[in-house]
Image: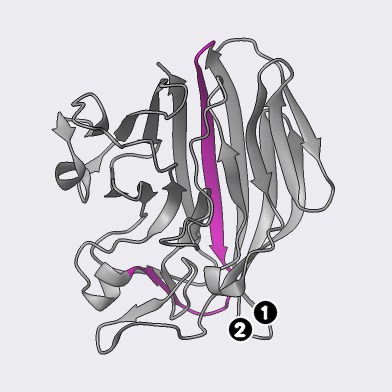
Amino acid sequence: MMKDELKIRDDGVRAVEIYREEGGLLLRYVYRPETALEEATRPFAHPVRTLAGEVLTNFRPNDHPWHHGLNFTIGCLSGHNFWGGVTYRKEDGYQWRGDHGTQRHTGWLEQGPNYLAHTLEWRVGAAGEVLLRENRALTLAVLSPKEWSLRWASALKNVSGRMLELGQYRSNQELAGSHYGGLQFRGARDLLDDHGDAAIGIFAEGGLSGEKEVHGSATHWMEWRGQKDGSQRRVRLRFANNDGPRHWFVRRHNPLAAIPFQYDRDLSFVPGATLAIDHTLTFTDS
């Protein structure tokens, strides 16, 4: 690990910024968002930047305004939509159903330039019933003059007092390819725009390449290799699973990566049980 001192600013109301005194903002983490309920209000990181200042995330894109930079969410939680947007049911398709949940920041456990840890509640309904309590930790490290990493680890506890079903539209509505959930990264539009350049694209462990091969595969890591407009700088984003292979949900043309923690079947989550996720994202100016 390279010694590179990071700084922190907290506005005391909504957001924390992590930055390098010489190199500018790396990440803004909004822990008390003001996004609409229909977008499943939840904390998010945006912008996320490389050490050279290239913006990697997109926030509220016009095709899916409920895609909020980098965030962690669940597509379907016992009939509640924590992903945002319209909800799919196989009998009548996508509809607005007023079934969105929210994630609420409840307190800081630790707050520093290299480590952010806080508690959240996952709430539903007008009364704000709490289904899950979460401990979330973000660890930042500068690895070299061109590379830094963000480790995102969360532990969610079922505090509802009843069995919960965690899933997505593939596992519970038989909608092919729709494994929405887990850690979600909505990328800047120019990242994977290749103009015939074979070096730009989506790649994964085992020699997999392209959206068709990577989407739905289960590997330890997956990469986006892209090029930014303006600077023409090449960038690389690596998504890695620290607890073993996971299936990927990936879209190229409206760049999206998500890492669902379950795949073909809903996960039955007993009262008092804890679910842990652990991923590391590495951002490189190449």
Quarter of the image where the N terminus is located:
top right
The residue closer to the viewer here, 178 or 186, is 186
The spot of residue 232 in percent (x, y) is: 41, 21
Residue interval drawn in magenta: 145-168
The answer, for residue 226, to whether it is visible in the render is yes
Q: Going 15% across and 47% down the picture, which residue do you hit?
A: 212
Q: Going 60% across and 61% down the picture, which residue do you hit?
A: 42
In the image: residue 276, left or right of residue 24: left
Amino acid type of the residue that numbered disc 2 sits on in the rendered structure: Gly
Report the residue marked by disc 1.
128
Q: Going 38% across and 39% down the picture, which residue do you hit?
A: 243
Q: Is residue 82 above or below residue 161?
A: above
Helix, strand or loop status at disc 1: loop
The residue closer to the viewer here, 101 or 27, is 27
Q: Are marks 2 and 1 in contact (CB under 8 Å)?
A: yes
The spot of residue 10 in percent (x, y) is: 80, 41
In the image: residue 32, left or right of residue 47: right
The residue positioned farthest toward the right in the image shown: 12
Quarter of the image where the C terminus is located:
top left
Helix, strand or loop status at disc 2: loop
Q: Is residue 93 above or below residue 138?
A: below
Amino acid type of the residue that numbered disc 1 sits on in the rendered structure: Gly
Q: Is residue 219 above or below residue 178?
A: above
Classed neighbour count for the residue bearing mark 2: other residues with Cα under 10 Å, few (<14), some (14–19), many (≥20):
few
Report the residue marked by disc 2.
125
Q: Quadrant of residue 74?
A: bottom left
Magenta stretch contains residue 167? yes
Q: Is residue 2 above or below residue 38?
A: above
The spot of residue 175 in percent (x, y) is: 22, 72
Q: Quadrant of residue 189?
A: top left
